[in-house]
Amino acid sequence: MVSLYTVSFWGALLLNI
């Protein structure tokens, strides 16, 4: 599942904003 990677990716972007 790439879901974990996707969540981590978007999670990092949201935290960076």
Image (cartoon, rainbow, N blue to C red):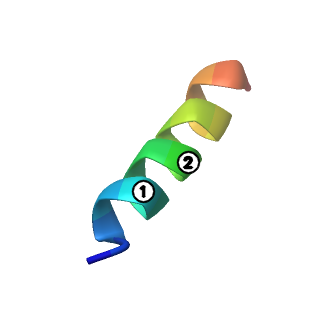
Name the side, left or right, on which 13 lies relative to 10.
right
Residue 11 screen position, x and y as percent: 48, 39
- Residue 13's tag is none
Residue 3 screen position, x and y as percent: 32, 70
Q: Which residue lies furthest to the right in this view?
A: 17
Q: Mark 2: which amino acid?
A: Phe
For residue 2, what is the image quadrant? Answer: bottom left
The residue lying toward the viewer, choosing from 15 and 1, is 1
Mark 2 neighbour density, 10 Å: few (under 14) some (14–19) many (20 or more): few
Q: Are marks 2 and 1 in contact (CB under 8 Å)?
A: yes
- Quadrant in which the C terminus is drawn: top right
Labels in figure, total = 2
Residue 1 screen position, x and y as percent: 26, 77
Q: Does dot 1 land on a helix, a strand or a loop? A: helix
For residue 13, what is the image quadrant? Answer: top right
Mark 1 neighbour density, 10 Å: few (under 14) some (14–19) many (20 or more): few
- Residue 5's tag is 1
Name the side, left or right, on which 1 lies relative to 13.
left
Residue on which disc 2 sits: 9
Q: Which residue lies furthest to the top in this view?
A: 16
